[in-house]
Image: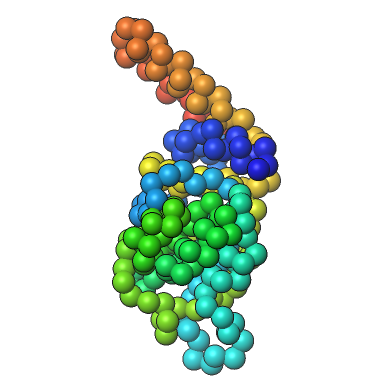
Amino acid sequence: MSDHIARLRALDTCAVSDALDRHGIRGVLVGLQPLAADRLIAGRAVTVLLGPPPEDAAGVPGRHLGTAAVDASGPGDVIVVAHQGRTDCAGWGGLLSRAAVARGIDGVIVDGAARDLAEAAAAGLAVHARMPTPVTARGRAVERSWGEAVEVDGIPVASGDLILADAGGVVIVPAALADQVLTTAESVAATETAMAEAIEAGIPVSDVMGKSYEELTDGEH
């Protein structure tokens, strides 16, 4: 496990979101929910771009969507499926979940619907998506590419960017800014831990959550 991933695992999405704010970076994916295997996801993005089947099937990969990315991934990787927010069909399913677990993949993020979520949960794979659906992608969506830069919820995501997902949501940290964002997030988390200890010690919350708390996300944008 890389140092960045180990540091990411020690944080939560709220601290990372605050750090992204401080650095003026949009990195929170809105509307995604944990739908299988209630546990934290942390790792490097491996991207998959989906789209409607073209009228001319020439050039469309002759394989099921997501399979190449899964086969090329392993521990410390998170599959990120750019499904354009579609909920009319699944951008991820049960056999892919089983294959991801077999490869040691840390989790899956789908900007759209996913299916076979009970199967994913039984296999131990954490999946965040917009909603569950039983509708297959066959005949409705195809893989356009994998491993290339995509856009998810209006936010650019490249393979190698850091992904953190927990009960609070999903955040993305650009790989080139990982050190700065993680250092800030660690500072935010330490400050909030000290504040929590002060509250537990009986200090009024109005004193604890004063000006210094409001300035936690201040920074030069």
Instruction: Locate residue 207: give its quadrant.
Output: top left
Whole-percent x, y for residue 132 in the image: 32, 63
Q: Can residue 210 be seen in this view?
A: no
Residue pictured at 48% horizontal, 64% vertical: 98
Which residue is at 59% across, 91% downward?
58
Q: Is residue 49 above or below residue 103?
A: below
Q: In which quarter of the image is the N terminus?
A: top right
76 on left or right of 167: right
Give the percent coordinates (x, y) of residue 8.
Answer: 57, 38
Determine whether, in the image, residue 210 is placed left or right of residue 43.
left
Residue 168 place in picture, x, y as percent: 39, 41
Viewer-proximal residue, 113 or 104? 104
Give the colour scheme of this rendering: rainbow
Instruction: Give whichever of 24, 30 is nearer the camera.
Output: 30
Q: How many marks?
A: 0
Residue 52 point in image, percent of width and height: 46, 80
In the picture, which quadrant includes the C terminus? top right
Q: Quadrant of residue 147?
A: bottom right
Between 122 and 148, the one nearer to me in the picture: 122
* Residue 1 is at least partly visible in this image: yes
Check the image and name the residue furthest to the top: 202
Q: Nearer the viewer, residue 68 or 184?
A: 68
Q: Which residue is drawn at 53% across and 65% down?
A: 99
Q: Which residue is drawn at the image coordinates 45% and 55% (left, top)?
A: 125
Residue 96 located left or right of residue 220: left
**From what the image shows, is residue 113 above or below residue 207?**
below
